[in-house]
Structures are given as structure tokens and as C-alpha cells.
Image (cartoon, rainbow, N blue to C red):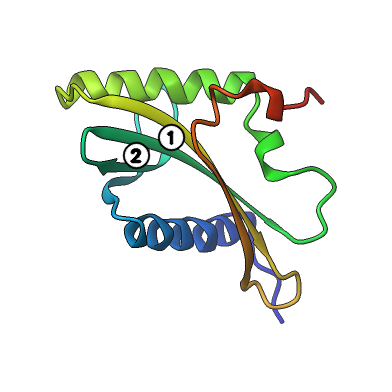
Amino acid sequence: MKKLSPIQVGKIGERRIVWYLRLRGYRIREKNMRNGYSEIDIIAEKRKLIVFVEVKTRTSGTLFPPRAAVNTEKRKKIITASRAYMKYKNIKKQVRYDIAEVYLKKDKYRVESINYIKDAFCDWRGYATF
């Protein structure tokens, strides 16, 4: 099987998380929204809630969990971008930041498992500093 680029691997994970969210009643507002601050992988909405989702996809057997890549600097960029988005779109809803970890089977690039972390930026205990 041909080795996929990191961008291709990431797209697999993002597509699966869009599906995952839709099954749970979320409406997808934006995908891969870029502005001068950062990129936000998925912006979803459910009732009075806007959710900014950072998707991290890895093949199984990686040393560190994918969420470890969402370090302090990355979180700051996402928060700044989300605030600009909310202001630009004039949205006045509650905001939540989630991280979706997608694990792929190494040999076939199929989704093996998903670890969806709600309110990931509020629970700092789950983050190690590397």
C-alpha cells in the first residue's frame, strides 16, 4: 500500500470527525477555516453552542497521544482565531473547544478508533509538557 502524506492522513481524520459530529446532531458550519491567526479544522453548532474542533490523526502505535500536539501555542492560536470568527460572524453563543484524536490502522489507513475530548482546553490535566 502506498504511503500517504501527513495532509492526506489528516483529511481522513477530519472527514471521519465531520461524520461523527453529524451523527450526534451537530451542524457543520465550516471546515478548515483559515484567517490571519490560525486554522480551525471544524466549526460545528448544536443548539446554543459553537464548538471549535481540532482534529489530530495518527497511525496506531505512535509514541505520544495526538492531543500532545495541541500545545499551549496551538491552543492560543485556536482561541484567537475563534474569537475573531465569532466577532466577524456576529455570533453570540456559548463556545467550547474540543480535540478529536483519530487513530488509523497503520497498514490500511482505515479508522481504528476515535477519542473525542469535549471541553479539552478547560481540562489541562490531560496535557503533558514535552
Q: Earlier in the sequence, mark 2 or mark 1?
A: 2
Provide residue 42's location: percent of width, then percent of height. 39, 44
Discs 2, 1 touching: Cβ within 8 Å? yes
Quadrant of the frame with the N terminus: bottom right
- SS of the residue at dot 2? strand
Left or right placement of residue 16 versus residue 18 in this view: right
Q: How many marks?
A: 2
Q: Amino acid at mark 1?
A: Glu
Residue 75 lies, with reference to residue 25, above or below; the image says above
Q: Nearer the viewer, residue 46 or 12?
A: 46
Residue shown at 56% from the left, 55% from the top? 10
Residue 127 lies, with reference to residue 4, above or below; the image says above
Left or right placement of residue 87 versus residue 51 in this view: left
Name the residue tied to disc 1.
Answer: 39
How crowded pointer 1 is (Cα within 10 Å; few <14, some 14-19, many 20+) is rated as some
Provide residue 68's location: percent of width, then percent of height. 71, 35
Outermost residue on the left side: it is: 90
- The answer to whether residue 8 shows anywhere in this view is yes
Residue shown at 63% from the left, 19% from the top? 72
- The answer to whether residue 36 shows anywhere in this view is no
Outermost residue on the bottom side: it is: 1
Residue 1 lies, with reference to residue 3, above or below; the image says below
Residue 33 — which label?
Answer: 2
